Amino acid sequence: MKGFYRTVAIVTIFSVAEKFLGFLYRVYLSRTIGSEGIGLYQVALSVFALLLTITCSGTPITVSRLMTKYRAEGREDKVKKVITAGLSFTLAIALPIALIFMLFGSSFSFLFADERCLSVFLIVIPGLIFTSIYSVLRGVFWGNKDFLPYSVTELLEEICMIIAGIFLIERATSVENGVARAGLAVLVSYIFSFSLATAVFIFRKNKLKNPISEFKPLLLSAIPVTAMRTANSFTSSLVSIILPLRLIEAGFEQAGAMSAFGAAVGQAFPLLYVPTTLIGSFILVLVPEISENYYKKQHFYLKRNVEKALKFTAILSAVFVPIFFVCGEEIGILVFDGHECGEYLTAASFLMLFMSLSSITTSILNSMGLEHKTLIYYLLSGVFMLIAIYSLPKYIGIYSLIVGYTFIYGITTVLNLVLLDRNCEQKPKYLKHLFGITLLIIPTSIFGMMLERILLPILGTLVTFLVSSILMACFYFILAFVFGLINVKIFKSKFKSRRHAVNTTV
């Protein structure tokens, strides 16, 4: 277990650094190309993300899972075959799709609510080939439990995009030109990460082998995951098309609709993913363990790891809810210099708990070979989301997006938990913990609102946000300790064992 926590710590450090740099870069983009530019950038990349999802989204996790499965069964020769199958299959899809768009790009303007997005999309599209292959190599690193190359490559890719983006955007002559240059920076980063991951793959002496026998098991597992993630990206793309149009029909001007969309999707939502990002490294390391437990029929360890994943996810994500609910407007002002994003953060703060739980449960179920079920759940919830996006903008404007995402993450979380309970031989115990963690959000939010009312007139926006956030987090964890939702004995035992080790060394 000591090695597990060390790995999680290392991956977390790299992941937090990467996401923090990405966050700073998004702030830079917001302040240079504005919310309208962010809207154009976001729409173009959402269509690119849809194509990326189609080409490779299910393959990396399937390659990783099958590598774990074959090694658990002692069939090492199949590991090389499934790696080759994954790379071959992904390249066979990505290459023709990219070529079609590069050759006939002008014919696809109908994909965008604003035609200005097309030029940005066509700049990024060659990256589909590079980043698709890189995604499979990333799955190989997961399957080998070789997390350091993955973490380092992701961080360096972000740094590459930031350096290229700042260099290019500083020379922009207009909003449209700035957005195009931001797209070029994305392409540069994709080429960089592909090159670096390929070099590491070769250096680690990974070998390829005739993949024919592994295409069928790869496809049977990858297609449901790809379909679910394609549905996710397709839904995002539909939202990027439908929502601005419905806002315009509701009375917004075109620029105002793109600005509102950019503030919500390009500015607020990346911040709402903070808890999911923080648990990402935990998921990355734990999911292969859960997959191994499942295939080796280690029921006790499977139960323990599932409980650990759900409880950790719940308490880490729930602590952010009152902070964003109370300080959403301060965050919007400090980060993006605008009230619109902050108001949206406050209204959508409760989504963070569902977003994190949906992410962790879907990852666990996919690692157990239940991709078909998670696909059905997502499709069901996606229908409700699209209905909300289409029907509600004339009543609640951009806030219809919150209702839609509530359907997506709320329904999938509940159904995933039920499915998880049915497929664990020894039933995980977590409901009491989740319920208690959720209830603590209420008193913490009340405490935070009192603090904000007292401190804001005296200390100003920045200091109020910092002090209130720290005190709310402390208040939340104290309540969690008091009500037994955090196990104090674990920390005591770890401290004693560590002290004993020091004394023995001395």
Image: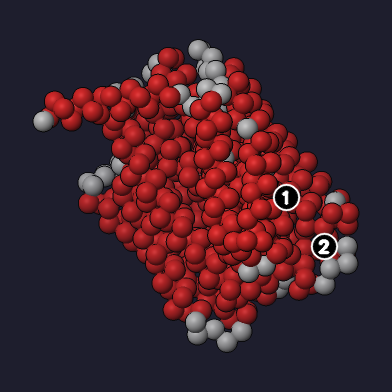
Is 52 on the left-hand or right-hand side of 506? Answer: right
> Is residue 163 depicted above or below 366 in this figure?
below
* Residue located beneath label 2 in the image: 247
Q: How many residues crowd around disc 2 within 10 Å: few (fewer than 14), some, or many (20 or more)?
A: many
Q: Is residue 402 among the parts visible in the rendering?
A: yes
- Depth check: 119 or 365 in front? 365
Figure quadrant of residue 261: bottom right
Q: Position of residue 197 (x, y in %)?
A: 33, 55
Q: Of label 1 and label 2, which has the lower sequence position? A: 2
Residue at far left of view: 506
* Residue located beneath label 1 in the image: 347
Residue at image location 54% in from the left, 84% down from the top: 172
Is 10 on the left-hand or right-hand side of 104? Answer: left
Figure quadrant of residue 213: top left
Is 178 on the left-hand or right-hand side of 144? Answer: right
> Is residue 290 depicted above or below 395 in this figure?
above
Mark 1: amino acid: Ala
Q: Is residue 140 among the parts visible in the rendering?
A: no
Q: Position of residue 139 (x, y in %)?
A: 40, 43
- Depth check: 158 or 198 in front? 158
> Is residue 472 depicted above or below 240 in this figure?
above
Q: CA distance from mark 1 to mark 2?
A: 19 Å
